[in-house]
Each structure stands twice: as C-alpha cells, then as structure tokens.
Image: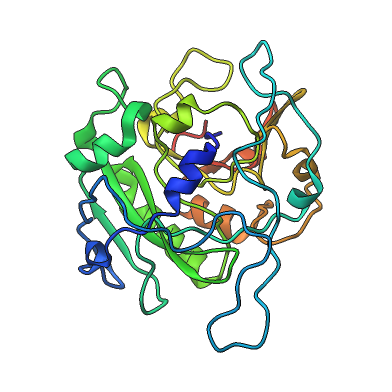
Amino acid sequence: MGIGPAAAVRRGAALLLAAALLAGCSGGTTAAPSMPSTPSAPSVPVASGVAPAPPGSASPGPAYSDWQLGVHVLPRTPGGYGEIRPTPKPLRVRRFPTADLLPPPADGRFHSSIGPVTAQIRERMGETWSPSCPVALRDLAYVTVSFRGFDGQAHTGELVLAAAEAEDVVSVFRALFAADFPIEEMRLPTTADLDAPPTGDGNNTAALVCRAARGQSAWSAHAYGLAIDVNPFLNPYHKGELVLPERASAYLDRTRAQPGIIHADDLVVREFARIGWAWGGSWSSLKDYQHFSATGR
C-alpha cells in the first residue's frame, strides 16, 4: 500500500517539464533522462469538471469527476491514518484527466527508459529514501514508461525501483499499454506526500517508499523497490476496519468491472505473475488489491 498525494503535490504533478528531457527515448528501453527540479507551466488541470474539447472540435470532452483532490482533510485516528469515510459520489466512478509531469510520447506509442538515480532525481525523492533504508541508491533505477490515462491519452510515468527488476517491470507496463489498461497517475512520491494530512483520495501508481510494512516493524517490499501499487484508490488495501485510501470503501466491492480495477486472472495479475511478482489481492489475512511485489509480501 502506497501513499496518496497532497493537493500541492497533485498541482505540482501538473507541471510540464521541457520536451527535450525525453528526446532520446525510443520504443525500446534507453538510458533514463536527468530531470531538473524546477518545472514549467501546467498543461492539464488536475480536477476539472469537464475537459475542454480539442481545438476545432464540435463534440464536448469526456465528463470527469468534479471532486477536488487532496483538499478534503480527514480527522486522524489513533493509528495515524485518516478516519474511514464512505466513498463520495463523484469518486464512485472515478475519472480524472492525467496531468503531465513528463512530456507525453509525441507519437502516442510506448516508450521507456532505465537509468541510475541521479542527484536531481534523488533530490526530488526527498525523505522517501535515506541512507538508513535497506537498499542503496546504486541498486535502484529510475524508470520511465508510457501509460494510458483515464482521459484516453498516452502519458509518461516514472518509478524508482530495484535495478535488477527494471527490465521485467518495463515489459509489464508495455503489455498494459498495448491493452489500453488505464492508469490515472504515475509519479515519484516525495516528502510532500509523507507530510500531507490524510485526504483518502489519492490514486498514484508508485514503487519505492522507504517505510515499514503496514502494522509491522519489518521493512515493506516498497522499501527495497520491490513492490508497485497500481491505481490504489480503485484497488484499496483492506484489513478489518482499515481501508486505504480512506475514502475508497466502495471499491471493496470486487464485482465492479470498471476500467482500472484489478481482478484475479486479469492481464495485470498475469503480467506481474509472468515476471515472478505476487498480487496482494490473493492474500487471505488481508487484501491489498493494488499491491504487486517480487517478495510475495
């Protein structure tokens, strides 16, 4: 189970970096670009009610959820999470445009890159990694992959994960892109995420966060870069009364079949299984429908 974005972080994710950053990416896997820490102007609003029609088009854009993400703060429980609340109506069929932090693929095709965690990327990661973490930076990789948003457009996502698993993980996202499996957001978690008050409405697909497993003292597989959470709001963590994200209770109904929800034997589960990664939705003591890991935990 990962962490949800703060409002400020979601707005930050809307900032488009210079297109030259990914100029070297191709349909294959290449070296990862370095990223400056200061982005430029936003390209897409994060939580608009209705997306604008393309220039010259008479037809309206698709309808999006009108919920304002990251601003409705929940009271904290003694366990440190937000208070569990019913899923708001605008999030019961969740759909938001994807804000571009990295330039989207100009040709609309799948692209990827694998490279080291540079000083610039390390700075952006903030407190999600420290020297006390159980994996060294040299054993991690910065990965970019194309993904299909709920807006139907191709976008570029980013992950930090174990370098030894990077090529296999890229192959999974290549298959998901080819199948038009939608992902709302895929960006690096930051210190702002760790410090954000709970709003229970995040949906960021992410990998490395150096933290203990939920309710345990042992390191999570995320702390090693060996786990990825996919569309966490649509595929929540559930144990007893705890649901994470805290507003995602409607998605405990796994008979739902809307895009982005993960079921047993779905392509997402089969593809991660192909590279030897296990799915938290198959666990018996709890359910972590978003969670895939190389360690089985």
Instruction: Quadrant for residue 258, please give it.
Output: bottom right
30 left or right, relative to 64: left
| Numbered circles on residues, count | 0
Please tell me which residue is depicted at 51% across the width and 22% down the height of the picture.
213
User: As rendered, which of 216 and 2 lies closer to the eye?
Assistant: 2
Tell me the colour scheme of the image. Answer: rainbow
The residue lying toward the viewer, choosing from 22 and 27, is 22
- Given residues 11 and 280, the one toward you in this image is 11
Question: Looking at the picture, does residue 178 appear above or below residue 38?
Answer: below
Q: Quadrant of residue 70?
A: top right
Instruction: From the viewer's perspective, tell me whether residue 273 is left or right of residue 88.
Output: left
Residue toward you, 169 or 31:
31
Q: Position of residue 282 (x, y in %)?
A: 66, 40
Write the residue at 46% across / 27% down. 194
Residue 29 in the image: x percent, y percent? 27, 64
Residue 117 seen in this snapshot:
no
Is residue 79 something one can see in this rendering? yes
Judge left or right: residue 229 versus residue 91.
left
